[in-house]
Amino acid sequence: MQKIITLTTDFGYQDHYVGTMKGVILCHNPDVAIVDLTHGVTPHSVLEANFVLRGSYHYFPAGTLHVIVVDPGVGGSRRILYVEKEGYRFLAPDNGVLTEIVESPERLISVENRGEFLESVSSTFHGRDVFAPLAAKLCAGLDPEELGPPCADPTVLDWPAPDVEKGSVVEGCVLYIDVYGNLVTNIAAWHVSDLGGEPLVFLKGDEIGTPQRSYDSTDLGRPVAIINSFGLLEIAVREGSAARAFKAGTGDEVTVAVS
Amino acid sequence: MQKIITLTTDFGYQDHYVGTMKGVILCHNPDVAIVDLTHGVTPHSVLEANFVLRGSYHYFPAGTLHVIVVDPGVGGSRRILYVEKEGYRFLAPDNGVLTEIVESPERLISVENRGEFLESVSSTFHGRDVFAPLAAKLCAGLDPEELGPPCADPTVLDWPAPDVEKGSVVEGCVLYIDVYGNLVTNIAAWHVSDLGGEPLVFLKGDEIGTPQRSYDSTDLGRPVAIINSFGLLEIAVREGSAARAFKAGTGDEVTVAVS
Amino acid sequence: MQKIITLTTDFGYQDHYVGTMKGVILCHNPDVAIVDLTHGVTPHSVLEANFVLRGSYHYFPAGTLHVIVVDPGVGGSRRILYVEKEGYRFLAPDNGVLTEIVESPERLISVENRGEFLESVSSTFHGRDVFAPLAAKLCAGLDPEELGPPCADPTVLDWPAPDVEKGSVVEGCVLYIDVYGNLVTNIAAWHVSDLGGEPLVFLKGDEIGTPQRSYDSTDLGRPVAIINSFGLLEIAVREGSAARAFKAGTGDEVTVAVS
């Protein structure tokens, strides 16, 4: 079986940055399979990259190495982390992008051995000069212990959690807006079910309704609340864009109340 | 030889949806080669996805499995189809995206056996939970007969055909606008040649001229009509955008007349 | 080891053009690995494609075949070139996109033998009909000598070089703007170091400062000049967009002066 490396970056699709990373990986390990998780993370958005990673890393084969390069501190003093958890491996800057993943890991290493980097390391493109050769070599059998010492204090983000008043209301927010304009919230399915009773969803005070089973539970162009495929409450417009319809952005208030 | 799966979706390139689908495919079949046909289909545009598929499926090796997830009815009552035709295989929602392909197929099955889906199936992301594992398993040798019963009444789109007045004029429309702003019409090369005589192309009443052999048959920035690489009449602007120059959109009228 | 083909085009990510090229490649050579260098080149921008290629081709394994289809003259009289240099191979239209690469090549051939193209060649999509089958066959062992005769007069671009007044000032310009809004100039690291003394960078007359070691040498939202990972002077805004902050475009004047 081929070894798998996934790439998650904010490099976008205009430039040659992702392609160049792949060239370096293949130079050091021609037998690896490289999968783009996404390169569409909003530039510098560590929170968004963490959201994307959390929702998808466990859908890959065990042993997959997930490489995340959303790295506004590139070239500065931030550390680089290698993590093993639940049979998966992760390589990323230590800026919070591995929040939740660095909780009770099986292995957590601060990468300090520059001997496995490219010979010449720029201060602006560690994806190419550091992450790519490391990932390739780790998939070719490099012992992670050679990368550096254990790390005890990884950076974690202050992830926005909803306010819960048990049995009456959950106050959360829009966390992520996808390509369809669906508004993904930080309110989980269990927040809603814990409320008991008939839940009603509100976006910035506007009533959306009770969570439905699927998008086609409403008419074309009408809003619908739904528990999405990542187990989170989502507000959508059927075959339309909720972001446009409600002029909504990340951080906007979403509440669930029982009547 | 590796088995090939192509993916055609409206998932875009911002989110992790395509990447997650690939993870699930690789979990169930590590030996498959996955090719992105495109993920840039306009959200929910079944017609556009059908256009894209028609023009390209036969450029892949025989045996290729084409998976199309443009699926506004996800989670609802729409069926899922598995089709074999001309040595190719197709897996898609039964919403018209396989129009023309479901005509005289060698095999046409309604996928009803949930035993090959992921264990937990969401109502919003069948690309990951249904199409990905099915595609992986079909390429690993799963007998399509096990997916469900034959289907006799697939959904087909009312594909916009041009009006032809034999020997005098063809009235069609802009069907698709590509990244260059080229206006691809629903008028085929044979519609034009059937007219006989010297054909003149008009866009919304403006004369474009006689179809030329290549883009450089006109000056930089000037419009040109051409029979494109998919055998369709196209209106372009040399090293420019016809969509911008003519403020043109899909559905705009294009006519060909003989003088 | 798998043979590697990279693709660099201005096809973008909306259409099925790149996917179709890959289908044709796999028809003629199922064992090749295809890597997207980028498809985000500005439509018809030969200069931009050349810039992208120069900065990345040597990060791939020796023997890699780089295919570039930024080809506004498709279907016209422009030639197609096959080049070998520094252990790499290149296939591209003869429109200047291989500038610098065609200087002192090990082999330079004008592709004239239509016998290796697809049977039916359109005049608008040589990526699919010409470049894809040629690339696939070259990686399967086709002798380049069979493609056509040597070429002695390849097209080269008038690449914008900075004006250097030794020991006092370098006058260059913005050459490329990346997805972050970083302004990449045509001023190389050695232009700056050759000046001697303390260099000061100006963008359209505004003082940016002395080149720093990394982006975090300045405060969030503040501009910084830096030698980037391709050895070129770049003007950035920390975790922001220099293009937006300075309303800058390609061609804008950048100067470096010593005090």
Image (spheres, coloured by chain):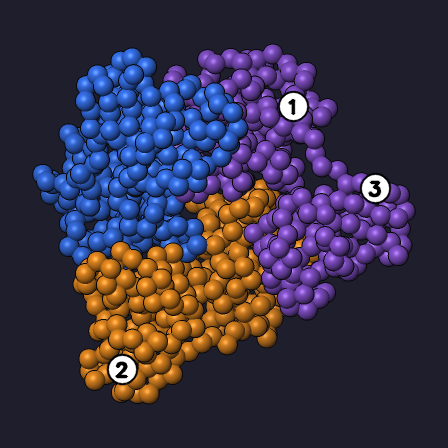
Chain colours: A purple, B orange, C blue
Read off the chain for label 2: B
Q: Mark 2 packing: few (<14 Cα in 10 Å), some, or many (20+)?
A: many
Q: Residue at x 74, y 58 (%)?
A: A206
Relative to C70, say whether B210 is above or below.
below
Q: Is B75 placed left or right of B142 in the picture?
A: right
Q: Is residue B257 above or below residue C78?
A: below
Q: Secondary structure at mark 2?
A: strand
- Residue tagged 3: A164
Camera-nearest residue between A125 and C77:
A125
Give me the chain letter of mark 1.
Answer: A
Residue behind mark 1: A155
Q: Residue at x 19, y 22 (%)?
A: C165
Dot in front, 3 or 2: 3
Where's the C terminus of chain B, which quadrant?
A: bottom left
Return the residue at label 2.
Answer: B257
Residue B247 percent across, percent down from the top left: 37, 66
